[in-house]
Image (cartoon, rainbow, N blue to C red):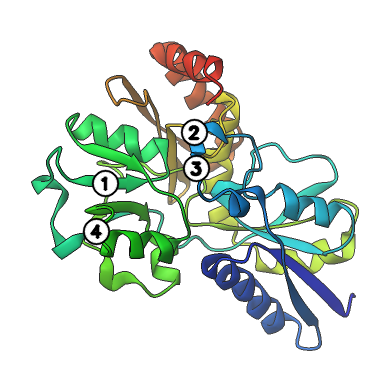
Amino acid sequence: MKDNLTIGTRGSKLALYQANLVKEELLKCFKNLNVSISIIKTKGDQLLEKSLSSLLDKGFFTKEIQDKLYAGNIDLAVHSLKDLPTDLPTESCIAAILKREDHRDVFISRNSKPLSEFSSSDIIGTSSLRRKSQLLKYNSSLNVKEIRGNVDTRIKKMLNGDYQAIVMAAAGVKRLGLQKHITEYFDTDFMLTAPGQGAIAVEVRSNDSKTKEIVSKLNDELTQVCVNSERDFLRQLGGGCHVPFAAHSKISGSSITIDALVNSIDGRKSFREKKTVELSQVKVLGEDIAQNILSSGASIIVDQLKNSKL
Protein backbone atom coordinates (compact mmCIF):
# COMPACT_ATOMS: atom_id res chain seq x y z
CA MET A 1 0.00 0.00 0.00
CA LYS A 2 1.13 3.55 -0.66
CA ASP A 3 2.44 5.58 2.29
CA ASN A 4 2.00 9.06 0.78
CA LEU A 5 -0.87 10.62 -1.14
CA THR A 6 -1.29 14.13 -2.52
CA ILE A 7 -4.78 15.58 -2.97
CA GLY A 8 -5.36 18.20 -5.65
CA THR A 9 -8.09 20.79 -5.08
CA ARG A 10 -9.21 24.33 -5.78
CA GLY A 11 -8.30 26.91 -3.16
CA SER A 12 -11.72 28.20 -2.11
CA LYS A 13 -12.87 27.67 1.46
CA LEU A 14 -15.45 25.15 0.29
CA ALA A 15 -12.98 23.23 -1.90
CA LEU A 16 -10.47 23.08 0.96
CA TYR A 17 -13.19 21.92 3.34
CA GLN A 18 -14.01 19.09 0.94
CA ALA A 19 -10.36 18.16 0.41
CA ASN A 20 -9.73 18.12 4.17
CA LEU A 21 -12.84 16.01 4.68
CA VAL A 22 -11.45 13.43 2.24
CA LYS A 23 -8.09 13.61 4.03
CA GLU A 24 -9.73 13.04 7.43
CA GLU A 25 -11.76 10.10 6.14
CA LEU A 26 -8.65 8.52 4.59
CA LEU A 27 -6.73 8.88 7.86
CA LYS A 28 -9.59 7.23 9.76
CA CYS A 29 -9.21 4.19 7.51
CA PHE A 30 -5.41 4.22 7.24
CA LYS A 31 -3.68 5.51 10.38
CA ASN A 32 -0.14 5.46 8.92
CA LEU A 33 -1.00 7.20 5.67
CA ASN A 34 0.62 10.58 4.98
CA VAL A 35 -1.81 12.85 3.10
CA SER A 36 -0.95 16.32 1.79
CA ILE A 37 -3.06 18.89 -0.10
CA SER A 38 -1.99 20.79 -3.22
CA ILE A 39 -3.98 23.89 -4.23
CA ILE A 40 -4.48 24.31 -7.98
CA LYS A 41 -6.10 27.29 -9.70
CA THR A 42 -8.67 26.48 -12.38
CA LYS A 43 -10.03 28.66 -15.16
CA GLY A 44 -13.13 29.19 -13.02
CA ASP A 45 -10.95 30.65 -10.25
CA GLN A 46 -8.99 32.89 -12.60
CA LEU A 47 -11.96 34.37 -14.49
CA LEU A 48 -14.18 35.42 -11.61
CA GLU A 49 -15.37 38.60 -13.30
CA LYS A 50 -16.39 36.96 -16.59
CA SER A 51 -19.94 35.84 -17.30
CA LEU A 52 -20.47 32.10 -16.99
CA SER A 53 -22.78 32.19 -20.01
CA SER A 54 -19.73 32.80 -22.22
CA LEU A 55 -17.47 30.33 -20.42
CA LEU A 56 -19.40 27.10 -20.45
CA ASP A 57 -16.75 24.70 -21.69
CA LYS A 58 -16.62 21.35 -19.94
CA GLY A 59 -14.23 21.15 -17.00
CA PHE A 60 -14.44 24.88 -16.24
CA PHE A 61 -13.74 24.20 -12.55
CA THR A 62 -11.82 20.93 -12.92
CA LYS A 63 -9.54 20.77 -16.00
CA GLU A 64 -6.35 22.17 -14.47
CA ILE A 65 -6.67 19.82 -11.49
CA GLN A 66 -7.24 16.88 -13.81
CA ASP A 67 -4.19 17.83 -15.88
CA LYS A 68 -2.04 17.65 -12.73
CA LEU A 69 -3.57 14.26 -11.95
CA TYR A 70 -2.82 12.83 -15.38
CA ALA A 71 0.74 14.18 -15.22
CA GLY A 72 1.31 12.41 -11.90
CA ASN A 73 1.79 15.62 -9.88
CA ILE A 74 -1.06 14.64 -7.56
CA ASP A 75 -2.53 11.25 -6.67
CA LEU A 76 -6.20 12.13 -6.38
CA ALA A 77 -8.46 15.05 -7.19
CA VAL A 78 -11.40 16.16 -5.04
CA HIS A 79 -14.34 17.80 -6.81
CA SER A 80 -17.89 18.88 -6.19
CA LEU A 81 -19.49 16.17 -8.31
CA LYS A 82 -21.87 18.58 -10.04
CA ASP A 83 -18.83 20.42 -11.48
CA LEU A 84 -17.27 17.27 -12.92
CA PRO A 85 -17.96 16.53 -16.62
CA THR A 86 -20.10 13.44 -17.14
CA ASP A 87 -17.59 11.95 -19.57
CA LEU A 88 -14.11 11.46 -18.13
CA PRO A 89 -11.07 10.63 -20.27
CA THR A 90 -9.75 7.07 -20.15
CA GLU A 91 -6.81 8.26 -18.01
CA SER A 92 -9.01 8.67 -14.93
CA CYS A 93 -12.04 7.37 -13.06
CA ILE A 94 -14.13 8.23 -10.02
CA ALA A 95 -12.84 5.98 -7.24
CA ALA A 96 -15.26 7.18 -4.56
CA ILE A 97 -18.32 9.33 -4.02
CA LEU A 98 -18.82 10.38 -0.42
CA LYS A 99 -22.21 10.28 1.26
CA ARG A 100 -24.27 13.13 -0.13
CA GLU A 101 -24.92 16.23 1.96
CA ASP A 102 -28.23 18.13 1.71
CA HIS A 103 -29.04 18.16 -2.01
CA ARG A 104 -31.45 21.13 -1.92
CA ASP A 105 -31.05 24.74 -3.00
CA VAL A 106 -31.49 27.57 -0.51
CA PHE A 107 -32.71 31.16 -0.67
CA ILE A 108 -30.60 33.70 1.23
CA SER A 109 -32.00 37.22 1.46
CA ARG A 110 -31.50 40.51 3.23
CA ASN A 111 -33.61 40.83 6.38
CA SER A 112 -34.90 37.25 5.81
CA LYS A 113 -37.40 38.43 3.23
CA PRO A 114 -39.10 35.38 1.62
CA LEU A 115 -39.14 34.83 -2.13
CA SER A 116 -42.93 35.21 -2.20
CA GLU A 117 -42.50 38.91 -1.32
CA PHE A 118 -39.93 39.66 -4.04
CA SER A 119 -40.78 41.92 -6.99
CA SER A 120 -38.99 43.08 -10.14
CA SER A 121 -37.20 45.79 -8.14
CA ASP A 122 -35.37 43.17 -6.04
CA ILE A 123 -32.23 41.67 -7.53
CA ILE A 124 -31.70 37.92 -7.04
CA GLY A 125 -28.23 36.59 -7.76
CA THR A 126 -27.37 33.13 -9.06
CA SER A 127 -24.62 31.67 -11.22
CA SER A 128 -26.86 28.84 -12.40
CA LEU A 129 -29.06 28.85 -15.51
CA ARG A 130 -30.93 25.94 -13.92
CA ARG A 131 -31.86 28.03 -10.89
CA LYS A 132 -32.62 31.10 -13.01
CA SER A 133 -35.00 29.18 -15.27
CA GLN A 134 -36.93 27.73 -12.34
CA LEU A 135 -37.17 31.08 -10.58
CA LEU A 136 -38.58 32.63 -13.75
CA LYS A 137 -41.00 29.73 -14.16
CA TYR A 138 -42.30 30.52 -10.67
CA ASN A 139 -42.53 34.27 -11.37
CA SER A 140 -41.53 35.67 -14.76
CA SER A 141 -41.21 39.21 -13.35
CA LEU A 142 -38.36 38.31 -10.98
CA ASN A 143 -35.12 40.22 -11.56
CA VAL A 144 -32.48 37.46 -11.73
CA LYS A 145 -28.88 38.55 -12.31
CA GLU A 146 -25.66 36.59 -12.53
CA ILE A 147 -23.36 36.50 -9.51
CA ARG A 148 -19.83 35.09 -9.43
CA GLY A 149 -17.50 34.22 -6.58
CA ASN A 150 -17.13 31.61 -3.89
CA VAL A 151 -19.86 30.83 -1.34
CA ASP A 152 -18.69 33.33 1.27
CA THR A 153 -18.00 36.00 -1.39
CA ARG A 154 -21.55 35.75 -2.74
CA ILE A 155 -23.05 36.04 0.72
CA LYS A 156 -20.94 39.15 1.37
CA LYS A 157 -22.14 40.71 -1.89
CA MET A 158 -25.72 40.13 -0.79
CA LEU A 159 -25.14 41.51 2.71
CA ASN A 160 -23.45 44.57 1.19
CA GLY A 161 -26.57 45.32 -0.84
CA ASP A 162 -25.35 44.41 -4.33
CA TYR A 163 -28.16 41.84 -4.39
CA GLN A 164 -31.31 41.54 -2.29
CA ALA A 165 -31.02 37.74 -2.34
CA ILE A 166 -29.02 34.85 -3.73
CA VAL A 167 -29.82 31.21 -4.46
CA MET A 168 -27.16 28.62 -3.68
CA ALA A 169 -26.63 24.95 -2.93
CA ALA A 170 -27.47 24.07 0.66
CA ALA A 171 -24.49 21.71 0.89
CA GLY A 172 -21.87 24.41 0.41
CA VAL A 173 -23.55 26.80 2.83
CA LYS A 174 -23.85 24.11 5.50
CA ARG A 175 -20.32 22.78 5.02
CA LEU A 176 -18.97 26.26 5.74
CA GLY A 177 -21.21 26.70 8.79
CA LEU A 178 -23.14 29.60 7.26
CA GLN A 179 -26.66 28.24 7.86
CA LYS A 180 -27.61 31.33 9.89
CA HIS A 181 -27.95 33.24 6.61
CA ILE A 182 -30.50 30.84 5.08
CA THR A 183 -33.98 32.30 4.66
CA GLU A 184 -35.68 29.34 2.97
CA TYR A 185 -34.88 25.80 1.88
CA PHE A 186 -36.39 24.98 -1.51
CA ASP A 187 -37.82 21.49 -1.74
CA THR A 188 -37.36 19.67 -5.04
CA ASP A 189 -41.03 20.11 -5.97
CA PHE A 190 -40.29 23.83 -6.25
CA MET A 191 -36.68 23.78 -7.45
CA LEU A 192 -35.17 20.57 -8.77
CA THR A 193 -31.46 20.32 -8.17
CA ALA A 194 -28.41 19.75 -10.38
CA PRO A 195 -27.32 16.16 -11.07
CA GLY A 196 -24.88 15.15 -8.36
CA GLN A 197 -25.53 18.24 -6.21
CA GLY A 198 -24.33 17.82 -2.63
CA ALA A 199 -21.94 14.96 -3.43
CA ILE A 200 -18.13 14.98 -3.35
CA ALA A 201 -16.23 12.93 -5.94
CA VAL A 202 -12.67 11.62 -5.69
CA GLU A 203 -10.96 11.13 -9.05
CA VAL A 204 -7.83 8.99 -9.51
CA ARG A 205 -5.74 7.75 -12.44
CA SER A 206 -7.27 4.67 -14.02
CA ASN A 207 -3.97 2.77 -13.93
CA ASP A 208 -3.21 3.60 -10.28
CA SER A 209 -4.70 0.50 -8.71
CA LYS A 210 -3.15 1.12 -5.28
CA THR A 211 -4.64 4.59 -4.87
CA LYS A 212 -7.92 3.38 -6.31
CA GLU A 213 -8.09 0.63 -3.68
CA ILE A 214 -7.34 3.06 -0.84
CA VAL A 215 -9.84 5.71 -1.97
CA SER A 216 -12.60 3.16 -2.61
CA LYS A 217 -12.98 2.78 1.16
CA LEU A 218 -14.68 6.19 1.19
CA ASN A 219 -17.37 5.30 -1.34
CA ASP A 220 -21.02 5.49 -0.27
CA GLU A 221 -22.84 2.98 -2.43
CA LEU A 222 -26.34 4.43 -2.10
CA THR A 223 -25.13 7.90 -3.05
CA GLN A 224 -23.17 6.45 -5.95
CA VAL A 225 -26.22 4.67 -7.36
CA CYS A 226 -28.36 7.82 -7.14
CA VAL A 227 -25.88 10.27 -8.63
CA ASN A 228 -24.88 7.88 -11.40
CA SER A 229 -28.47 7.80 -12.64
CA GLU A 230 -28.65 11.61 -12.46
CA ARG A 231 -25.41 11.97 -14.42
CA ASP A 232 -26.58 9.38 -16.96
CA PHE A 233 -29.59 11.61 -17.59
CA LEU A 234 -27.36 14.65 -18.10
CA ARG A 235 -24.93 12.72 -20.30
CA GLN A 236 -27.75 11.58 -22.56
CA LEU A 237 -28.79 15.20 -23.10
CA GLY A 238 -25.21 16.25 -23.81
CA GLY A 239 -25.26 18.92 -21.11
CA GLY A 240 -22.66 20.20 -18.69
CA CYS A 241 -23.02 21.56 -15.18
CA HIS A 242 -24.35 24.99 -16.26
CA VAL A 243 -27.36 24.07 -18.38
CA PRO A 244 -31.00 24.46 -17.21
CA PHE A 245 -31.40 20.69 -16.73
CA ALA A 246 -32.04 19.08 -13.35
CA ALA A 247 -32.32 15.62 -11.84
CA HIS A 248 -32.54 14.03 -8.42
CA SER A 249 -32.79 10.35 -7.51
CA LYS A 250 -34.00 8.73 -4.32
CA ILE A 251 -33.89 5.11 -3.17
CA SER A 252 -36.80 3.61 -1.27
CA GLY A 253 -36.54 -0.04 -0.32
CA SER A 254 -35.67 -2.04 -3.41
CA SER A 255 -36.65 0.70 -5.90
CA ILE A 256 -35.23 4.01 -7.10
CA THR A 257 -37.07 7.07 -8.41
CA ILE A 258 -35.57 9.77 -10.58
CA ASP A 259 -37.16 13.19 -10.99
CA ALA A 260 -35.81 15.00 -14.07
CA LEU A 261 -36.38 18.37 -15.69
CA VAL A 262 -35.53 20.33 -18.84
CA ASN A 263 -36.39 24.04 -18.84
CA SER A 264 -35.94 26.86 -21.27
CA ILE A 265 -33.75 29.57 -19.77
CA ASP A 266 -36.67 32.00 -19.51
CA GLY A 267 -38.75 29.36 -17.71
CA ARG A 268 -41.59 29.55 -20.22
CA LYS A 269 -41.17 25.97 -21.43
CA SER A 270 -40.74 23.15 -18.99
CA PHE A 271 -40.63 19.37 -19.34
CA ARG A 272 -40.53 17.25 -16.20
CA GLU A 273 -40.98 13.55 -15.52
CA LYS A 274 -40.55 10.98 -12.78
CA LYS A 275 -39.72 7.34 -13.25
CA THR A 276 -39.43 4.50 -10.71
CA VAL A 277 -37.72 1.16 -11.33
CA GLU A 278 -36.33 -1.70 -9.30
CA LEU A 279 -32.69 -1.18 -8.31
CA SER A 280 -31.78 -4.10 -10.58
CA GLN A 281 -32.78 -1.89 -13.55
CA VAL A 282 -30.99 1.27 -12.43
CA LYS A 283 -28.33 1.17 -15.15
CA VAL A 284 -30.82 2.31 -17.81
CA LEU A 285 -32.87 4.66 -15.61
CA GLY A 286 -31.09 7.91 -16.46
CA GLU A 287 -31.00 7.20 -20.18
CA ASP A 288 -34.65 6.11 -20.25
CA ILE A 289 -36.01 9.22 -18.56
CA ALA A 290 -33.83 11.42 -20.80
CA GLN A 291 -35.38 9.80 -23.87
CA ASN A 292 -38.88 10.19 -22.40
CA ILE A 293 -38.35 13.91 -21.79
CA LEU A 294 -36.77 14.47 -25.19
CA SER A 295 -39.65 12.76 -26.96
CA SER A 296 -42.19 14.80 -24.99
CA GLY A 297 -40.89 17.98 -26.62
CA ALA A 298 -37.75 18.93 -24.69
CA SER A 299 -35.55 18.12 -27.70
CA ILE A 300 -36.39 21.60 -29.06
CA ILE A 301 -34.88 23.25 -25.95
CA VAL A 302 -31.84 20.97 -25.99
CA ASP A 303 -31.16 21.70 -29.66
CA GLN A 304 -31.54 25.44 -29.11
CA LEU A 305 -29.06 25.37 -26.24
CA LYS A 306 -26.54 23.38 -28.25
CA ASN A 307 -26.84 25.77 -31.19
CA SER A 308 -26.30 28.75 -28.87
CA LYS A 309 -23.23 26.96 -27.35
CA LEU A 310 -24.64 27.07 -23.84
Q: Which residue is mark 2?
A: 53
> How far is disc 4 from disc 2 in space, using C-alphas?
24 Å
Percent position (x, y) of residue 144?
28, 39
Mark 1 residue type: Ile
Q: Earlier in the sequence, mark 3 or mark 1?
A: 1
SS under mark 3: loop
Q: Nearer the viewer, mark 1 or mark 4?
A: 4
Disc ID at residue 124: 1
Mark 4 residue type: Gly
User: Badge 4: few (under 14), some or many (20 or more) residues near its Cα, within 10 Å?
Assistant: few
Q: Earlier in the sequence, mark 1 or mark 2?
A: 2
Q: Earlier in the sequence, mark 3 or mark 4?
A: 4
User: Badge 3: few (under 14), some or many (20 or more) residues near its Cα, within 10 Å?
Assistant: many
Q: Looking at the image, which residue is at 39% across and 65% down? A: 173
> How far is disc 3 from disc 1 in space, using C-alphas?
23 Å
Residue most extreme to the left:
117
Q: Looking at the image, which residue is at 86% across and 52% down? A: 70
SS under mark 2: helix
Disc ID at residue 161: 4
Percent position (x, y) of residue 163?
26, 52
Q: Earlier in the sequence, mark 4 or mark 2?
A: 2
SS under mark 1: strand
Q: Nearer the viewer, residue 121 or 276?
A: 121
User: Badge 2: few (under 14), some or many (20 or more) residues near its Cα, within 10 Å?
Assistant: some
> How far is disc 1 from disc 4 in space, using C-alphas?
11 Å
Q: Quadrant of the N terminus?
A: bottom right
Q: Mark 1 touching mark 4, by CB under 8 A? A: no
Q: Nearer the viewer, residue 176 or 27?
A: 176
Q: Nearer the viewer, mark 3 or mark 1?
A: 1
Q: Which residue is mark 3?
A: 195
Mark 3 residue type: Pro
Q: Looking at the image, which residue is at 48% across and 39% down? A: 51
